[in-house]
Image (spheres, rainbow, N blue to C red):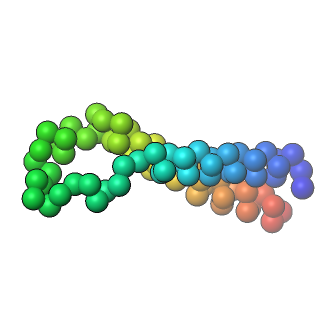
Amino acid sequence: MGWIDWTLSIVTVLVGIVLTIIVMLQNSKDSQSSITGANTFYGTNKSKTLDGTLSRYTVVFAIAFCLLCFATTVAIMK
């Protein structure tokens, strides 16, 4: 394995660890009651809360993780 393979592998592991931490920091989705609905203040301003920010970071890091896994596999297969 060359230096590119090692670098991609290490970055993939680090992104996986960060993704795991971000997912574990999020609140459970079971906390929102079906009685209150999504028309509450929290529901309409969710993107401005910590939960909304963590949700966005989850999507970004999940896409990065998938792309890194693909790139690492291609680099190792050469």
Along the viewing direction, whichever of 14 and 32 lies nearer the viewer? 32
Position of the C terminus by quadrant: bottom right
Can residue 1 be seen in the rendering of this structure?
A: yes
Residue 46 % position (x, y): 25, 41
User: In screen coordinates, is 9 left or right of 61?
Assistant: right
The reply, left or right, for residue 48 in relation to residue 55 is left
Task: Where is residue 20? Give x, y as percent.
Answer: 56, 51
Left or right, 76 with respect to 63, comes to right
Residue 11 figure quarter? top right
Question: Number of callouts in the render?
Answer: 0
Q: Position of residue 65 (x, y in %)?
A: 59, 53
Evaluate whether residue 63 shows in this view.
no
Front-most of residues 7 and 24: 24
* Residue in view at x 36 percent, y 36 percent: 50
Q: Quadrant where the N terminus lies? A: bottom right
Q: Residue at x 41, y 42 (%)?
A: 54
Q: Is residue 20 left or right of residue 10?
A: left
The residue shown at (75%, 47%) is 10
Locate residue 28: give its quadrant. Answer: bottom left
Position of residue 48 measured from the top left corner of the image (x, y, whole percent): 28, 34
Residue closest to the far top: 48
- Quadrant position of residue 43: top left
Q: Residue furthest bottom?
A: 77
